[in-house]
Amino acid sequence: MEENQNHTKKCPKCGVVLPYKGFYKDRTKIGGLGTYCITCTKKRNKKHYRENVEKIKKQRKEYCEKNIDTIRLKAREAQKRAVKDNPDFYKDCYKKYIENKRTYYKNNKEKIIENNKKRKNKLRFFVFEKLGSFKCIKCGFDNINALCIDHINNDGSEDRKKIGFDSIALYRKILNMPQSEARNLYQVLCRNCNWLKYIEWVTG
């Protein structure tokens, strides 16, 4: 390691001679270092992002949608490793996080409630859009405030045991699954038709 610190390399972009630590590591390159120095690489990356911002955002969104489960799994595994390597540090961080969260909620309660309501309604709108209907598929009632998500196979209780009773959890589950699968499992009903369906199912 000390030997590498004494070695230098010239950046072909700016012409500055820097020690190895002035370059990003790159296993695909001979010598294991990037072609340009860190400063030039950052400038190059920023320029590329500005010129292709919409394309990059689209690619990132598509990748996240296709690999959401893998991304979450890797994040959880990385978090577990970090906590295992530094248990005391993360224990203190968690305590501070809880304290800050409680303080922030206490000082911004109304704002948080309003933002959560907006976020919930936004997700609900996207779910209706994905299921292909903004009205009850039974009676045609179209007041969005009276519409709900119905489990076609009457397995709502089993579903809630897995994901919880929070409607946002259900919305996210639907939005993360393929559209064809979502439309085979869920449908849009008004609360009256949803209740009548439940009564018919219970009474046989």
Image: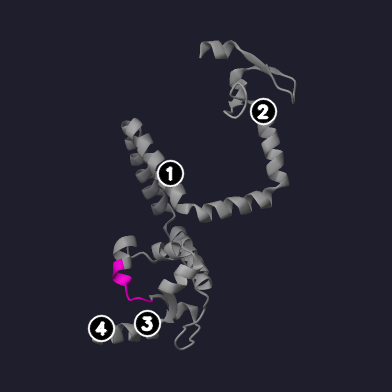
In the drawing, does residue 22 fall left or right of residue 79? right
Which amino acid, mark 1?
A: Lys
Q: CA distance from mark 1 to mark 4?
A: 42 Å
Q: CA distance from mark 4 to mark 2?
A: 68 Å
Q: CA distance from mark 3 to mark 1?
A: 38 Å
Which residues, given as a range, are shown in magenta? 152-158
Query: Is there a contact, CB below 8 Å, between mark 3 and mark 4?
Result: no
Q: Quadrant of residue 190?
A: bottom left
Q: Secondary structure at mark 4?
A: helix
Viewer-side label of 2, 1: 1
Image x and y of residue 71, in percent: 46, 48
Quick one: quadrant of the C terminus? bottom left
Among the two numbered marks 3 and 2 on one chain, the one whose residue lies closer to the N terminus: 2
Residue under label 2? 39
Q: Residue at x 45, y 78 (%)?
A: 188
Q: Is residue 86 visible?
A: no
- How is the model colour-coded? one colour
Q: CA distance from mark 2 to mark 1?
A: 29 Å
Q: Which numbered tag is attached to residue 108?
A: none
Q: Which numbered tag is attached to residue 202?
A: 4
19 in relation to 93, above or below: above
Is 157 magenta? The answer is yes
Which amino acid, mark 2?
A: Thr
Among the two numbered marks 3 and 1 on one chain, the one whose residue lies closer to the N terminus: 1
Among the two numbered marks 2 and 1 on one chain, the one whose residue lies closer to the N terminus: 2
